[in-house]
Amino acid sequence: MSSEPRKPGRPKKITRDAIATAGRRLTLPRATVAGVAEELGVGVRALYKHTNGINDIQVITAEAIFASWEAPVPGEAPLEVHLLEIALSLRKLAIENPGIAGFLVRNSHETSPEVQRAMDAHQQSVAAAYQLKLAHSSLLIAAVAEHALAVTDVVHSHGGRVRDVDRMLERADLPALSAAARETQFRRDEEFFEFSTQALVKGLLALLADDERDEARN
């Protein structure tokens, strides 16, 4: 018994992947219902049949951006260096994808189960690679990630810091700020970010070491 082959149907324009791709092209701040509909070449009403509106579109877009993040492989560098690598890679993700830093910091409760599982698996891999407690691995990564995303969001949301280093060098009435201006490591955003992240990491590791010693004594 033969049957006629099915005729190929019109390809779907409105899929989750299509929405994510359109949102990423627009950038997260411009990923509105109207913007994505225009990007896909569909009507706003048609898009509403597949989403719950702008919040849904923002979440879909943000999750696609986060899924593109390639976390540094744990175990290839000392823990302190690895945590700095995580911060630098998240900073790069945030700079290349306007809006994602603020979204992840302020809307972490809206992440999908898939993203949560990916985050948990990454934290487990770091714990295993460096013989950390799961809670300590999670704490370290969460603190470093929040620092990286929040700082990048604030600094780059308006085009970066504006520094008048040369003029500050001449301010004898502001000796502390003048001394800082002479430190070349603070003259570029990238260098100051790395410095502040290293300070955070060293402090976190010292606090965790203190906790370990206190537990051993008790």
Image: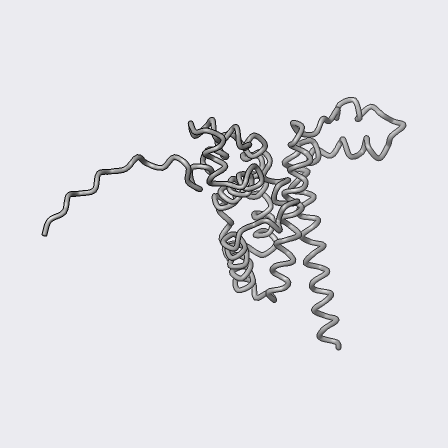
In the rendered image, the residue lying farthest to the right is: 173
- Residue drawn at x 45%, y 34% is 46
x and y percent of residue 209 in the render?
Answer: 70, 64
Q: Residue furthest bottom?
A: 218
Seen from this angle, which residue lies furthest left? 1
Classify 93 as above or below 78.
Answer: above
Q: Is residue 114 above or below residue 151?
A: below
Q: Position of residue 28 (x, y in %)?
A: 56, 34
Q: Residue at x 21, y 38 (%)?
A: 7
- The residue under the point 69% across, 62% down is 208
Picture layout, residue 192 above or below residue 167: below
Left or right of 38 in this view: 139: right
Nearer the observer, 163 or 1: 1
Residue 18 in the figure: left or right of residue 134: left
* Viewer-closest of 7 and 84: 7
> Left of 11 or right of it: where is 136?
right
Q: Position of residue 93 (x, y in %)?
A: 54, 39
The image's colour scheme reads: one colour
Which corner quadrant of the image does residue 13 belong to?
A: top left
The location of residue 52, given as percent across then percent down, is 54, 41
